[in-house]
Amino acid sequence: MGKDNRCFREVWFKDRDWLEYSVSKDAAFCFWCYLFRPSNIGFGGDDVFTRSGFINWKKAIEKFNEHVGGVGSAHNEARIQFEGFKNQRQSVEYSFSSEKHELEVAYRKRLTSILKVIRFLLLQGLPFRGHDESSTSSNRGNFLELLKWYSSECPEVAAVVGMNAPGNNQMIAPKIQKQLVNACAVETTNAILADLGDRWFTLLLDEARDCSVKEQMAVVIRYVNKHGEVIERFMAVVHVATTTAACLKEAIDSLFAKYSLSVARLRGQGYDGASNMSGEFNGLKSLIMKENPYALYVHYFALQLQLVVVAVAQANQYVCDFMWIVGSIVNTSASSCKRADKLRQLEHDRKVKLLERGEISSGRGLNQETSLARPGDTRWGSHHSTLCRIEQMWPSVIEVLQNLIDDGDRSSKGLSRTLVERMERNSFSRFDVQKLVRLAHFYTDDFSWSERILVEQELETYIDDVRSDERFEGISDLGALAKKMIETMKNRVFPLVYRMIELALLLPVATATVERVFSAMNIVKTDLRNRIGDEWMNDSLVVYIEKDVFNTVDNEPIL
């Protein structure tokens, strides 16, 4: 500039928070005006500080002060906007809105109250909507009626819902209900996935038609948690257009992608004997095993046992006659209410006479011991424990099961036989190291070459150790053994043995969990609710079936 060399000086930044310097353009700018340029800018050289940049260093101080201007200048308006952007709750604009905070508090109370109502309805599997939800209806449906009752019992709730809520913020629309239910289902599933972590798991699934004649596929995963407990969790019910293996595989791939589950972590598959599921060449299990050969397929033991019992019963004339007589009695009595009542009365009179003679006794404890357990009581019980109870009831069936195993898939033959043998009540006295070592050779990706050599030595040491440890007395199944190893921290001392136990526990035994999903589906989706959408039904089922997990989820993440 003339004879003088001038440039931007760093000292100009002092007391000028708005000032910015561009090295590439060698120009100064106003950061506040650049972001929040008022509509009346363009006079007094202000446009220079937002577009082309200021470069007249000789008059820099003068022009800086001119740009800042007075209290109502464009620059100070931009400053107010900037400060409000940085901290909206302390901005000038927010300070004028004194009622905003109160509205936020009321909104949160209203949303929390509605969520509590929704949680109750989901846990009970109850419908939300009513046939007539108008203000003049005597029954507006479970959701609105329960919210009305809740507000009548709690003044704090009454102050923020109903007539006391803004007309455009009632939070009772069906869309809002579905969004909250979806949030509940998502958080429940997230809790399950967090518990699963990066562990191995087994895939269990089956299909069934719902009341609206739509094919639904129920998906359940089985895994061993950090406490050594065998866990089976319901993941989703998916509507499938057809039941072909390719269609089912596509649905599973989409589900795995949604929940970030890897096929590489699969260590087992459990389906029924249908050809689309268990087909040797084009079945679902074959398609999955092409991607992961360690996802071994096991035909449900419970179904095999049923087939055996049916075949044995049909070959016995006494059993056939008994079943025919029972069937005739049921058909005759069930066809007439009068005959059914008469049969009940005769049985009642007979029991009374036996009680009076002291030939039978009644009592709560006795009833609990002799009666069949309700399905809900054993919902997530270990199926390996179920197999132990089967052994105690029908020891001769084990031999038949082993014959069935010999006719099964080659890859799971040795595994299943080893599993059945280990389920003996006196299993510690019957350990066969050579047979157990075979388990490690089925999973070459999970046991390195050196580990497969060391596993035999570790097994021998482990067997001697547990036989001398009183804490392992009374262990009757693999599930209890895994839990005891975690409790005693022997899983760290014998990691290879625990890894083998975990892999054995992943093999499925029964379809009970999947079948209970279909039972729950008949509760959630009834003839009166046959228009319920697939997503709405799935979200409701996730919460209803996994209610023990849902009860651990707080309101905050859902909100």
Image (cartoon, rainbow, N blue to C red):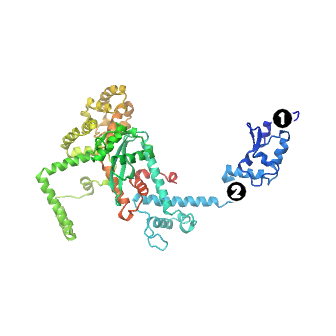
x and y, in percent, of residue 157 in the image: 53, 63
Looking at the rendered structure, the secondary structure element under dot 2 is helix
Q: What's the residue at 79%, 48% (across, down)?
A: 46
* Residue ranking furthest to the bottom: 136
Instruction: Give the camera-side residue of 246 and 510.
Output: 246
Looking at the rendered structure, the secondary structure element under dot 1 is loop
Q: Is residue 432 above or below residue 237?
A: above
- Disc number placed over residue 258 in the picture, else none: none
Judge from the rendering whether residue 520 lies leftward or rightward of residue 434; answer left or right. right
Q: Please give the residue where the numbered disc 2 appears in the rendered image.
A: 93
- Using the rendered view, name the quadrant where residue 458 is placed: top left
Whether residue 376 is visible here, answered yes or no, is no
* Residue ranking furthest to the left: 317
x and y, in percent, of residue 73 in the image: 79, 53
Q: Residues within 10 Å of mark 2 (few under 14, many from 20)?
A: few
Q: Is residue 266 above or below residue 523?
A: above
Whether residue 111 is visible here, answered yes or no, is yes
- Using the rendered view, name the quadrant where residue 124 is placed: bottom left
Which of pointers 1 and 2 indicates the residue nearer the eye? Answer: 1
Q: What's the residue at 31%, 44% (across, down)?
A: 283
- Disc number placed over residue 6 in the picture, else none: 1
x and y, in percent, of residue 184 in the image: 46, 54
Report the amino acid beneath label 1.
Arg
Report the amino acid beneath label 2.
Glu
